[in-house]
Amino acid sequence: MAQATAAFIAGLPKVELHVHIQGVLDAPLRHKLAQKNNVPDIADTVEGLERRYQEFFSACCDRSTDVAELSRGFFELFERGGRVLVTADDFYELAMLYYRRAAQMNVRYAEPFIDFMELTRWGVSLDTQMAGYRRAQVEAKRTLGVKSAWVLSFSRTADPIEMMAAYEDALRHRDMIVGIGMAGFSDESSPLKFNQLYTRARQDGFRLTIHCDPTVPAPAIHQHIRECVTQLGGGGVDRIDHGISAADSTGLVDLLRRNAIGLTICPWTSLPALMHHDDPDQAFFEGVVRRLFDSGVRISIHSDDPALAGQNWVQEALEVVADRAKFTQEEVVQLSLNAVEMSWASCEAKAMLREEIVAYQASPA
Ligand SMILES: [Zn+2]
C-alpha cells in the first residue's frame, strides 16, 4: 500500500494526547502578553523572540550540543515564557491559539497538559489558569468542534509534599481534569518517589500518565519504565509519555504489549536525545518507531511543545513518521486509532472517533 502523504494525513481525524499547552506559546503571543502585563522577557521584540526559538531548535538538531545542556535550555525558554501569562484572559488566548491550530489539522479530541506548578509558585493561582482554560475549552467545542479534557501535569523537580498540597488544591477543578501527568527535568531517581501522589490520584478516579524521558540513560530509564508499568499508583499507570527507551529492551517491549500500555511518542522533541547515534534518524524512525509499532506495542504520535520544536505540530509529526519510517496510509490510520484507544474519552466519544477515522480511511476527502 502507498506511503501516507501529507494530504492524506491532513484530512485524517486526529487525537492529540501529548501537547503541553504552555509549549504552544509562540513569539507573537508571548511578545503581546509581555507588553500587556509589563513583564521583562528574554527579548523585547517578536523578531528577537523568534530568533531565540530558532536558535534553540537549531541546537536541538546539532550533534555537538550536550543533551543535559539542551534540557536546561529548554526549561529556561519554556518556564520563562510562562511568566508572561498572568490573567485568565491570557490563558484563554493561549488555549485558543492551540484549539484554532488543532481545528485546522483536523484534531477532533485533545488531552493537553497543564504544567501549572511553576506558575502558581510565581503567584498566578490555579483558579486564574483554569478560568481561562475552561472558557477556551467550552468555546473550542462549540465553535471549532474540537473536544478536550485536561491533564494536570506535576513538575518532576517539585518536592513530593508540595505536590500533594498542589494536588489537594486542584481538586476543586476536578470536573475539567481527566488525568494526572508528570513532566520536567528527569534524573536517575525512581519515579516511585511520587507513589503517594499517584496512588491518591488513582483512588480519586483519575487516569495516570508520566513522562519517561529518553534523556535518562539506561539501565535507569528501563527500570523507571518497568516501575511505571507495574507499580506506580498501586498497579501501574495507564499510559507513558515518550518511553521510547523501551525499544532497546525485549523484556520491556513484551511488558508494554502484555499490559496494553501505550506510548505517546513525539518525534521532534525525542530526536535530540538520540544525537549520539551514528545515524540518529535511523535510530529513531527504524530503531524506535518502526520497531515498537511492528512489535505490537501501542504507540501514537504527537507534538509535545510545537513552539520550541520549530513549529512542528501533530500534522508534521505524523508526516515525518510516514516519510522516514515508511508508514502506509493504513499504518497511519492505525496510529490515529491507537490514540483513540489510549485516550481517556468516554466510550461513546471513542466510538464516534473510531467511526470518523474508519469512514475517512474508506473515502479520504
Ligand atoms: Zn512532554
Image (spheres, rainbow, N blue to C red):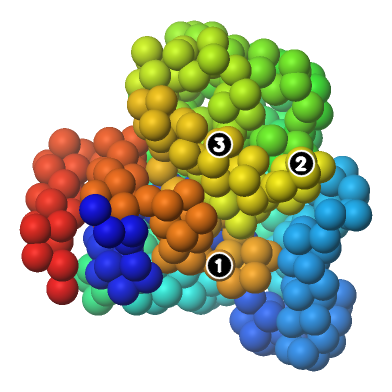
Q: Are marks 1 and 3 in contact (CB under 8 Å)?
A: no
Quadrant showing the C terminus? bottom left
Question: What residue type is disc 2 on?
Answer: His
Distance from disc 2 to disc 3, alpha carbons, whole Å, reads 13 Å
Image vertical order of residue 193 relative to residue 13, above or below? above
Say few, some or many: other residues with alpha carbon within 10 Å of mark 1 (under 14 / 14 to 19 / 20 or more).
many
- Is residue 317 or residue 72 the one in the foreground? 317
Q: Which residue is mark 3?
A: 288
Mark 1 → mark 3, Cα distance in angstroms: 19 Å
Sequence-wise first label, 1 or 3:
3
* SS class, disc 1: loop
Give the residue displayed 68% in from the left and 80% down from the top: 27
Q: Please say if the residues under marks 2 and 1 sit with CB atoms less than 8 Å apart.
A: no
Residue under the point 85% across and 81% down: 43
Residue count near mark 2 (Cα–Cα under 10 Å), binned few <14, some 14–19, many ≥20: few
**x, y percentage for residue 252?**
54, 16
Task: Report the residue marked by disc 2.
Answer: 277
The percent coordinates of residue 166 (x first, y second) are 63, 36
Residue type of the residue flagged with mark 3: Val
Q: Nearer the viewer, mark 1 or mark 3?
A: 3
In the rendered structure, which disc, 2 or 3, sits on the residue that comes first in sequence? 2
Residue 256's disc is none
- Disc 3 on helix, strand or loop? helix
- What residue is pinned by disc 1? 312
Q: Is residue 124 visible?
A: yes
In this rendering, is residue 87 above or below 78? below
- Mark 2, secondary structure of its residue: loop
Q: Nearer the viewer, mark 2 or mark 1?
A: 2
Residue 264: x, y in percent?
48, 41
Q: Amino acid at mark 1?
A: Asn
In the picture, measured across the screen, residue 77 lies left or right of residue 267, that is right
Quick one: label 2 or label 1, which is nearer the N terminus? 2
